Image (cartoon, rainbow, N blue to C red):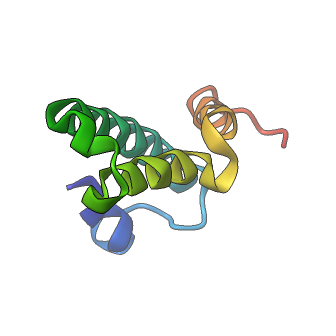
Amino acid sequence: MKARMMTAPDLYGIDPTGVEFLAKTRANKLFVTDQMTIIINKAMDLMGSHGYAREGHIEKHWRDSKIISLWMGGRGLAKLDIARWFYDCKSF
């Protein structure tokens, strides 16, 4: 549902150029990257030594999850944008 709201904001009444849209996309990014890292870590634990081997591609997904979580400013910038919208801060 969240992804659908971000791909079709006019159907859900969200202004795609506003601060609210930015904050909600940042919150979605935080949630998705956290869950992705947790799931990949569990997969690596489940597979044991095969999870760390390059042939299984799990370690590549783990590296990619760490890179994606840093993409577009990382956690700190995302939390700042969310707080800016939540507290209705006008200064940038």
Is residue 34 left or right of 86 when viewed as pictured? left
User: Looking at this view, is 75 or 87 the one in front?
Assistant: 75
Quadrant of the drawing holding the N terminus = bottom left
User: Looking at this view, is 79 or 15 the one in front?
Assistant: 79
Q: Residue at x 62, y 29 (%)?
A: 83
Image height check: is 79 above or below 67? above
Image height check: is 71 above or below 33? below
Where is residue 84 drawn, in percent x and y?
67, 34
Q: Residue furthest right?
A: 91
Where is residue 77 drawn, in percent x and y?
69, 39
Q: Residue furthest left?
A: 46
Where is residue 6 drawn, in percent x and y?
37, 64
Q: Residue at x 61, y 32 (%)?
A: 79
Is residue 63 left or right of 40 when viewed as pictured? right
Image height check: is 21 above or below 84? below
User: Looking at this view, is 1 or 60 the one in front?
Assistant: 60
Where is residue 19 drawn, in percent x and y?
61, 51
Quadrant of the drawing holding the C terminus = top right
